[in-house]
Image: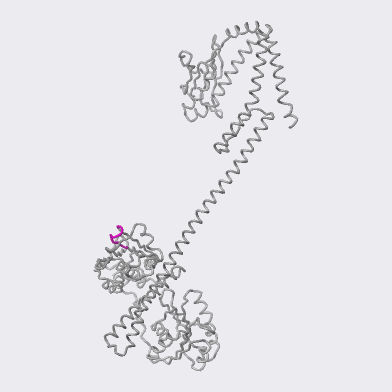
């Protein structure tokens, strides 16, 4: 390759110069005149045929896609050939597709397309060339070229050449040398121009045109290969940058979500601390009032009423926290039954009427005209309606109007709560159902809440297969919340009725209470003792096992998280002792997930109660005897009788 690169350009240049000089001497001889005229004719025909082939090649797409404008542009390229007077593109059916005419000539009539296409006709000092245009063997049309055939001018030129052959030969040699220099430098200029365009536009898809197969051709190939490699790397880099930008966008979105979640967490913790502290002051004040010696019965009764309300407020907050845990862990469940929606609406009104009246609002309730039945958990659905009523009361100024309506639309039962309160901004209509979202976040807000009521209501409605939607005209224009539920057929009137509540047992039990919360154990023991039961208490596991072996309780309620000997280990010990092997063991703990219940079962417990535990739950276990009564995460009791 290197040997060819060293020889080819100089050798070719020398051979061309020698051939040019020899041609000038041969032309000088008159004997070559006839040959030259014949060559001239053939060269003219070949040149025009080549032009026709080129026009046919570049015009094929224009004919194929019916683009006369491009066809006309292709014909206009013939302006560089003054000898061509006219050119015409025809379609396959003979119609004129595009035309070109030399501006320096008079108008020439467009000839009809002949039957025989590929032909050349010399008519005096004119020559006509016809060439067919086809693609893949399918004819698309034809191209026609009309040019001068300057035979007389050629003869006159040769007379001058014969008179000055030496000057003509030298001039011809000079012209050939000049042409050769242009042929050598043209590819280099092409590479230079492409390189400049790439630098300016950063378009690495450009390629230099290759004219020869010599060392310049090798240079062009190498340059194009370099552009291909640069283009490949540039595309790879661009793809990498796009991937990086996408990842950065996702990371930014995740960081924003984390920041928002962290902000909501901080707001929630601050709200929780505030709301849990609020009931403590009235409770402490109520205790001071009850302890005072000169407190009359009316003041004491009022203090007890205040303490009960504040205690219920704290229990409600704790219940909301438990519901939040059930939502986040996916443990929130419902127990459906066929029931009329009117009864659920009445339960919700009964639960919320006192709060609404205390806020000074007017409540209008519109029940459906006929009984509408749905498959629902009445307790949970009443909780949804009550939350919506309480929410309307919270965010409505005193003396507002709240409407609570139910109706049948198509096959849907629609229950709606509307108010004329503070309303919702458009961007809050979806966010209002997010966990821990507060509509009123000012310090002047008048009602408590953790911002979980609407999120819980939406989840409960979705568990019923329904939809909860919020509407508002904007701030200050009130709001409405609609619950859509599927209507069900009326239940069979002859169906078995559910059994009534179990009558309270008269049996007296031996009960062991073990918990490191001294106040809880003392108060619960007092209540059970007042009912006639024999109760023993302990505050840590080591003492409890000794008391149990001597007392031999029928029921043992054991706290799990105790210092020293925890509830699980204590239960295993009691199952080993003959005196307590048949005792009904009940785990009492603040942990209520399924894994915690599994731990209780493996430790030997019969039941698992989640704090806060009420007297009614303990009495239910005492009434069932050895029946396995297990509280589910959502507070519903399921009973499995032992054999």
Residue 401, placed above or below residue 32: below
Farthest residue, direction right: 3
Left or right: where does residue 147 sit relative to residue 306? right
Residue 622, placed above or below residue 463: below
Main secondary structure along the magenta-highlighted residues: loop
Residue 327, image x, y percentages:
43, 68
Q: Does the stretch in magenta take in 365?
A: no
Count of numbered marks? 0
Farthest residue, direction bottom: 550
Instruction: Examine the rendering and report whether any part of residue 643 can be seen.
Output: no
Residue 390, placed above or below residue 168: below
Q: Quadrant of residue 373?
A: bottom left
Q: Nearer the viewer, residue 387 or 438?
A: 438
Q: Quadrant of residue 392?
A: bottom left
Q: Quadrant of residue 522?
A: bottom left
Residue 606, image x, y percentages:
48, 82
Q: Nearer the viewer, residue 160 or 507?
A: 160
Residue 456, image x, y percentages:
39, 68
Instruction: Examine the rendering and report whether any part of residue 495 can be seen.
Output: yes
Residue 525, image x, y percentages:
41, 89
Residue range highlighted in magenta? 473-481
């Amino acid at each position: 390759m290197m040997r060819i690169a060293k020889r080819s350009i100089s050798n070719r240049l020398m051979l061309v110069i020698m051939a040019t000089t020899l041609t000038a001497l041969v032309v000088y001889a008159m004997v070559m005149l006839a040959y030259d005229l014949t060559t001239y004719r053939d060269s003219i025909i070949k040149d025009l045929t080549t032009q026709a082939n080129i026009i046919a090649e570049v015009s094929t797409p224009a004919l194929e896609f019916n683009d006369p404008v491009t066809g006309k542009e292709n014909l206009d390229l013939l302006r560089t050939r003054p000898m061509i007077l006219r050119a015409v593109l025809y379609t396959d059916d003979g119609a004129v597709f595009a035309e070109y005419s030399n501006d320096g000539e008079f108008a020439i009539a467009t000839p009809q397309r002949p039957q025989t296409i590929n032909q050349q006709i010399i008519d005096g000092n004119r020559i006509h060339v016809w060439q067919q245009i086809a693609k893949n063997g399918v004819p698309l049309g034809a191209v026609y070229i009309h040019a001068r055939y300057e035979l007389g001018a050629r003869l006159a030129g040769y007379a001058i050449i014969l008179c000055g052959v030496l000057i003509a030969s030298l001039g011809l040699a000079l012209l050939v040398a000049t042409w050769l220099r242009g042929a050598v430098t043209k590819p280099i200029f092409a590479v230079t121009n492409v390189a400049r365009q790439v630098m300016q536009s950063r378009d690495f898809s450009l390629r230099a045109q290759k004219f020869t197969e010599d060392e310049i051709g090798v240079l062009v190939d190498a340059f194009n290969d370099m552009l291909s490699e640069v283009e490949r790397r540039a595309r790879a880099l661009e793809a990498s940058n796009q991937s990086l930008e996408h990842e950065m966008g996702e990371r930014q979105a995740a960081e924003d979500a984390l920041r928002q979640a962290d902000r909501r967490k901080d707001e929630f913790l601050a709200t929780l601390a505030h709301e849990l502290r609020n009931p403590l002051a009235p409770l402490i004040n109520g205790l001071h009032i009850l302890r005072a010696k000169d407190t009359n019965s009316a003041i004491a009764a009022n203090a007890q009423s205040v303490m009960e309300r504040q205690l219920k407020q704290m229990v409600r907050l704790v219940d909301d926290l438990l519901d939040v845990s059930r939502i986040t862990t996916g443990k929130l469940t419902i127990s459906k039954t066929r029931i009329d929606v009117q009864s659920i609406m009445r339960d919700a009104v009964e639960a919320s009427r006192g709060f609404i009246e205390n806020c000074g609002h007017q409540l209008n309730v519109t029940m459906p005209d006929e009984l509408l039945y749905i498959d629902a958990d009445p307790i949970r659905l009443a909780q949804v309606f009550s939350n919506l009523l309480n929410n309307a009361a919270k965010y409505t100024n005193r003396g507002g109007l709240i409407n609570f309506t139910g109706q049948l639309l198509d096959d849907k039962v629609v229950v709606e709560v509307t108010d004329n309160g503070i309303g919702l901004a458009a961007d809050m209509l979806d966010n209002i159902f997010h966990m821990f979202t507060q509509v009123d976040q000012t310090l002047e807000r008048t009602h408590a809440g953790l911002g979980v009521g609407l999120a819980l209501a939406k989840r409960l409605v979705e568990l019923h297969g329904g939809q909860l939607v919020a509407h508002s005209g904007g701030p200050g224009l009130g709001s409405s919340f609609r619950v859509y539920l599927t209507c069900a057929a009326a239940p069979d009137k002859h169906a078995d009725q559910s059994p009534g509540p179990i009558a309270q047992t008269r049996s007296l039990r031996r009960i062991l209470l073990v918990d490191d919360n001294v106040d809880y154990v003392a108060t619960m023991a007092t209540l059970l003792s007042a009912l006639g039961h024999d109760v023993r208490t302990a505050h840590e596991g080591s003492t409890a096992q000794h008391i149990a072996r001597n007392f031999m309780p029928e029921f043992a309620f054991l706290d799990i998280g105790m210092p020293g000997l925890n509830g699980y280990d204590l239960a295993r010990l009691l199952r080993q002792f003959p005196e307590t092997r048949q005792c009904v063991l009940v785990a009492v703990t603040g942990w209520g997930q399924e894994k915690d219940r599994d731990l209780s079962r493996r430790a030997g417990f019969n039941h698992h109660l989640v704090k806060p535990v009420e007297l009614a739950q303990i009495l239910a276990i005492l009434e069932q005897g050895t029946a396995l009564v297990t509280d589910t995460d959502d507070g519903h009791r399921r009973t499995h009788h032992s054999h």
